[in-house]
Structures are given as structure tokens and as C-alpha cells.
Amino acid sequence: MSQKITPCLWFEDNAEEALEFYTKAFNDARITSTSRYGEGGPFPAGTLLTATIELAGQEFMVLNGGPHDKFNDAVSFYINCETQQEVDRYWDALLADGGSPTQCGWLKDRFGVSWQVVPDALSRYLNDPDPEKAQRVMDAMLKMVKIDIAELDAAYQGR
């Protein structure tokens, strides 16, 4: 059974390129369906119309829809990571070939899609019942671009 709600990512004309990019960025990615424009459409016949891709168990639809809409930060995709190695891998993969880092674990990939690459430790520390520990972690995180678990640990421990 497919998901009840599936995010749809609108690309101008490079959805097929995005599929290749995301299947490299996520080890467990798989394209589950594709459809193509026929004769008389807004793109040449055979151009990808839509595809469904699964990334880390989450289904997405991609669409070649033309230049009408662009991605913005109002929607981002949160990647919950267990280790620094996982943070680093997703961070590097999603920044590849023209992405841009922003702040506090956020980045935009080369297509303009916003991602948050965040270790479990951040949520755990920010939800600590000791407000001083949580605040030290928040202060440390606000100075980061990519989240560094060792720095979060040090802030949590008051070092």
C-alpha cells in the first residue's frame, strides 16, 4: 500500500536529473514508477512527466512542470541521523554539485530543495529537563552550519 500523503517536488525540466542525484545521495533510494509526456504536451514526447521515488522509506513524487514554481524554505525535509558519520554523509551528498549550506543543519541542494540534516542528539539534548544544559546546547547549535555532535556533547556537559 502506498502512503496516504506523498510530497510532490515540482522541477522546471530537470526532474530526471534530480532522480539520479537523490538515488546517489540516499543508499536505499529506489524509483518505483515513471510516466512520460506524449505528443502535444508542453515538453517533447518522451520527457519525464512524473516519477515516484522512495528515499529512506519516504515516498516522493517528482514532476517536470515548467518554470512556474520554485522551491523555497517554507518546506524542508528533515533527515534524522544517528551518528556524525551519517550527518556527514547526507550533508556532503546533498551539497554535491552546487548545493549551499545555510545554518543550524539546514542546506539547499543544487535544485533548491531545503533539507535539515540533524542528529538525534540535538533533540535529546534540547528536550533535557535541565534548562541550563538545553540552553547551552541551543547556544552551541546556533553557531553551527553543519551540526557537530562532539560540540553538542561538550556544550551539554558544560565544557
Image: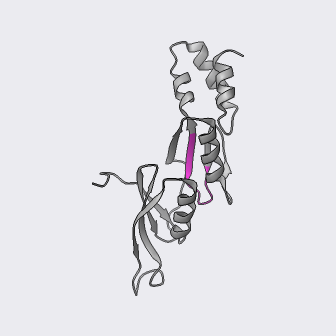
Snapshot quadrant of residue 86: top right
Residue 111 in magenta stretch: yes
Q: Nearer the viewer, residue 75 or 4?
A: 4
Asked if 119 appears above or below 34 in the picture, the reply is: above
x then y, percent, for residue 137: 63, 23
Snapshot quadrant of residue 118: top right
- Please name the residue shown 68% across and 59% down the image: 98
Asked if 151 appears above or below 88 in the picture, the reply is: above
- Please indicate, yes or no, whether residue 48 appears anywhere in the rendered image: yes
x then y, percent, for residue 133: 60, 16
Magenta-drawn segment: 108-117
Tell me the colour scheme of the image.
Answer: one colour
Where is the N terminus found, in terms of image quarters? bottom left
Where is the C terminus found, in terms of image quarters? top right
- Please name the residue shown 56% across and 28% down the image: 121
Q: Nearer the viewer, residue 41 or 118?
A: 118
- Please name the residue shown 51% across and 64% down the image: 19
x then y, percent, for residue 109: 61, 55
